[in-house]
Image (cartoon, rainbow, N blue to C red):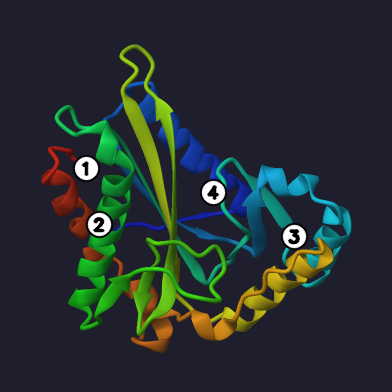
Amino acid sequence: MHQVSRFAVVEGLDAERHLLERIQQGEQACGLLLWRPQEAALVMPQRMSRLAGFAEAEAECRALGWPVALRDSGGEPVPQSPAVLNVALAYALPPRESEMTRIENAYLRLCHPMLDWLAGMGLEGGLGEVDGAFCDGRYNVTLASRKLVGTAQRWRRRRGDSCHVVLAHAAVLMENQREPMVEVVNAFYQGCGLDARVRASSHISLDECVGQVWSRLDPLRECYRRTLAEAGLELA
């Protein structure tokens, strides 16, 4: 079975950053990291720490058992906990790939293996926005029109040849923790005086659909290997 690394949330964010740095420095062309948090945290962009009311909202989240952690990328607050599988895919842009389509292609390379993995469990996944989901986006992976997986990406230039390199990230809700996750996101928004609100009914966890979810990860890495090979990328 492919090992899923266990990290404190901040350590996991650092591990993703180090993976991207290895690609950027030319130490490897492609890498995949699967990790699971050891504790709960509400992860959000650095910019949100400048919001009016942030200190009070942060204290409220901590009181709920979800201390705030800040990340490099954009987006909105995302709950992280031992109920979540994180998938970090990093690679250098293949030589014949157009820079015009690199962002969409990175999302598809992240999401299509997820869809294949779900299909192998007899589940029909989709892609798209879900009203009421936290950190909503076009490239959510969905089940029954509810959000199962959130995705994001960030790009840099490789040293030496200025080739684009990407870290594409997915967070999979493996276990049903929808209610407390939504509670803390809404508490943060309210504490900062923001109008946004999210709903538990907009999300779904994998263990609501199949059993023994953490023992089902072996095929996922092979799904990524096949998708990447189609672009000439070899996963070590």
Q: Secondary structure at mark 1?
A: loop
Instruction: Tell me the distance, in whole angstroms, between the alpha carbons under discs 3 and 4.
Output: 15 Å
Query: Which residue position holds label 3?
Result: 67
Q: Quadrant of the C terminus?
A: top left
Residue at the (58%, 46%) spot, across then down: 11
Query: Which of 141 and 10 lies nearest the eye of the viewer?
Result: 141
Query: Which residue position holds label 4?
Result: 12
Residue at the (30%, 59%) spot, across then down: 111
Q: Earlier in the sequence, mark 1 or mark 2?
A: 2
* Type of amino acid at the residue the image marks with label 2: Arg
Residue at the (30%, 67%) spot, across then down: 217
Instruction: Tell me the distance, in whole angstroms, between the alpha carbons under discs 3 and 1.
Output: 34 Å
Neighbour class for label 4 at 10 Å: few (<14), some, many (≥20)?
many
Neighbour class for label 3 at 10 Å: few (<14), some, many (≥20)?
some
Q: Position of residue 131 (x, y in %)?
A: 51, 76
Question: Taking the image as drawn, is residue 93 in sight?
Answer: no
Query: Which residue position holds label 2?
Result: 221
